[in-house]
Amino acid sequence: MAELEIRHLRAICSIADEGSVSRAAIRLGVTQPALTAQLRSIERLIGGELFQRSPNGSVPTELGRSVIRSARIVLEDMAALLATARSHVRNPAEAPLVVASTPLLFTSALISELRAWFRAELRTEIDSSAPVLLDLVAAKQADLAVFERFEGMENRQLADVEVRTIVDEPQFVALSSDSPLAEQEEIDLIQLAHLDWVAPPPDQDPMRLRFRSTCESMGFTPRITHHVTEGRAAMALAAAGAVCLAQPASLGGPGFVIRPLRGTALSVPVVLVIRLDGMFAARRQELFSCVAHAYRSIVDRNPTYAKWWAQHPEAHSDLDNALALPRPSRPS
């Protein structure tokens, strides 16, 4: 059963503080449609309307005022909890290295690389929401994060962080192995216009607006029928006859295949965000080398992606340069 999360409380309070969904979206670094969809999800979870639209913007309802008061208390308690916990870390050098990531195929390889090359206890934070991970780094609760660049990220006011593109990753698709299209080596996006699409919820989908606009430029509006947050559920729906975007290093499975798209602009930058006041401040090139080796290790798991990789060196030139850099000295 879905539950309220800290990010939901931040969203509610931001709308109340700003007095409008559009201004709150800018503050949070997300798109207005994504925040509107998130608000609707929150209201469904709570069971009532939190804001009413008026000439003066978004005005909290009686229920909304009660929820906002409680949300502020929870957020203040959470901030106090974190401050107390940090005060018990007597030696910053002994604090764990916190790596934040969305569920990407190379995350486990990155963890292995970092454990091999840096002397530090390591802890991971995995979340399907890239804005949440960016908040963790900005709030100094994570040392680095890797995720797909999301729409609205350029609106964030970021200090003491560096953002680097790891690779401009193409989007492949997963579809039923029983589909006639499964026989093709590449698929035109327009060939998928008649199918039901599987996608993440709007507030967790970095490709949402770009995907829709690309489809519409080809003359159709994608019929997004299923919203899911878990990869195996998405692939099961693809096996049952729907279609979804897939990371290019993904492998097919029972009932579904992974195929590249031909001639579209559907790609998304995978980025690395590093704190500039943390342990990597003077070792960013070494860190990027670790990230590059971790990502490159998954390319060949899907021969189709390996072929695409060889044919498109422009999409990963920075990563290739990083592969030539020396790795960090191994801990003694």
Image (cartoon, rainbow, N blue to C red):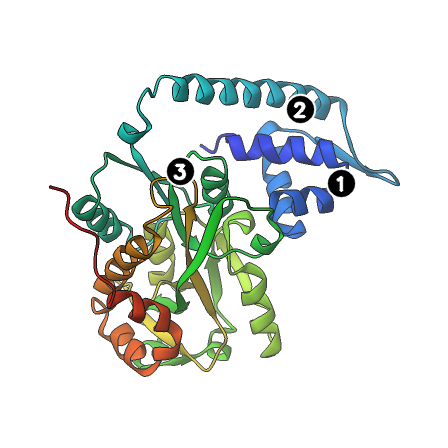
Whichever of callouts 3 and 2 sits on the residue coming sooner in the sequence is: 2
Whichever of callouts 3 and 1 sits on the residue coming sooner in the sequence is: 1
Circle 1 residue? 20
**Which residue is more in the foreground, 239 or 97?**
97
Find residue 59 and report its horizontal and vertical position in percent.
79, 32
Residue 123 location, quadrant: top left
- Where disc 2 sits, the SS reads helix
Circle 2 residue? 68
Amino acid at circle 3: Ala
Image check: 112 left or right of 263?
left
Vertical position of residue 191 compared to residue 250: above or below: below
Disc 3 to disc 2, how far (Cα)? 27 Å
Amino acid at circle 1: Ser
- Where disc 3 sits, the SS reads loop
Vertical position of residue 197 compared to residue 80: above or below: below
Residue at left offset 40%, top offset 42%: 127
Amino acid at circle 2: Ile
Vertical position of residue 327 compared to residue 2: above or below: below
Query: Viewer-nearest of labels 3 and 1?
Result: 3
Circle 3 residue? 142
Find residue 167 and report its horizontal and vertical position in percent.
38, 66
**Which residue is more in the foreground, 127 or 36?**
127
Residue at left offset 50%, top offset 54%: 205
